[in-house]
Amino acid sequence: MNTMHSRRELLKLSLLGGIGLSFHPYLDIVKENKKILSRAIPSSGESLPIVGLGTWQTFDAGNSEQQRKILSQVLLEMHRLGGTVIDSSPMYGSSEKVVGDLTNRLQFKDDLFYATKVWTSGKEAGIRQMEASMSKMRRNTMDLIQIHNLVDWKTHVKTLREWKDEQKIRYWGITHYVDSSHSTLERIIKVERPDFVQFNYSIRSRHAENSLFAAAKKYKTATIINQPYESGSLFRLVRGKQLPQWAKEQSINSWGQYFLKFILSNEDVTCVIPGTSKPHHMIDNMGAGLGKMPGTHMRNKMLTHLKSL
């Protein structure tokens, strides 16, 4: 049997119980119940698992019981392999409510790290939206609220600082998803010192390496990475192509792990949040947080190989 399957073909085996677990070395993580690596949040020293879960589109399931059942399994797989971070937003349709409803049924609900965002203008509107988000996600205290895409950030920073002082939230942050906003994120980091900054970074989109990562490190701001798969374009690039044989030596067993491990091998990355609504993809994503991380030589090799495709 070829040990380098596509993401979809290989990981569907994980849902087949003993059949899948018995003959593919990648699925050792299921049998051994390994936990992914963690990195410290600079402002507190608290450890955070390096792979989390984004909910844009993927958790916008409304009242569909069938979809909710599958999403519950996604959460169970994330937790079983050591993940805790769930990132949502009022921009993501019903995602906040779905997260709240599903996690409320879990025994480990208070072990998770809940993050959402404020995405509106005006102080009072921001307060109403954040209170609604906390209600939907069923949290009396939110772990992290971020200013989504910098919308009215000067107003919301003041509220978030007050809420942190009042212990309504544990951390606050800022977000964006395009390179052109990186300079603004840097300026805010230098002046406002947020606990977190969330931005885009991937194997082909490395603008953040110019100076954003350095600013976050200097001012002790944790980094959350969005767009790790470039909205799926990376998978389209490698469709039908086999992983190089040397990838296995780096504990890379799928193209998804190839892309995520490149990101995570940057030690200035605190956590990456690929979105998924599929349990087998959740297992795959978590697998990127296990085993050795590529060094400088291997990162360059991964880049060169991808450019050759």
Image (tube, rainbow, N blue to C red):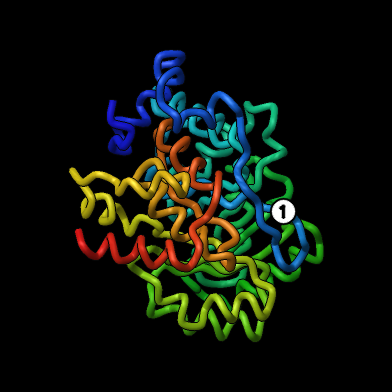
Could you tell me if residue 64 is visible in this image? no
Say which residue appears at 69% left-offset and 32% top-offset.
108
Residue farthest along the top direction in this orientation: 18
Between 165 and 275, the one lying in front of the other is 275
- Place residue 234 in its image quadrant: bottom left
Image quadrant in which the N terminus is located: top left
Could you tell me if residue 227 is visible in this image? yes
Q: Is 255 left, or right, of 36 in this rendering?
A: left
Say which residue appears at 18% left-offset and 43% top-offset.
240
Q: Is residue 177 above or below residue 81?
A: below
Say which residue appears at 70% left-offset and 59% top-offset.
40
Q: Is 281 left, or right, of 304 in this rendering?
A: right
Name the residue that disc number 1 marks.
Answer: 47
Say which residue appears at 45% left-offset and 28% top-offset.
68
Dot 1 amino acid type: Ser
- The secondary structure type at the circle numbered 1 is strand
List x then y, in percent, for residue 38. 65, 51
List x then y, in percent, for residue 188. 59, 82
Q: Is 163 left, or right, of 94 in this rendering?
A: right
- Place residue 284 in its image quadrant: top left
Between 123 and 271, the one lying in front of the other is 271
Pointer 1 local density, CA inside 10 Å: few below 14, some 14–19, many at least 20? few
Q: Is 12 left, or right, of 189 in this rendering?
A: left
List x then y, in percent, for residue 42. 71, 67
List x then y, in percent, for residue 101. 57, 33
- What count of labels does the image hold? 1
Image quadrant in which the C terminus is located: bottom left
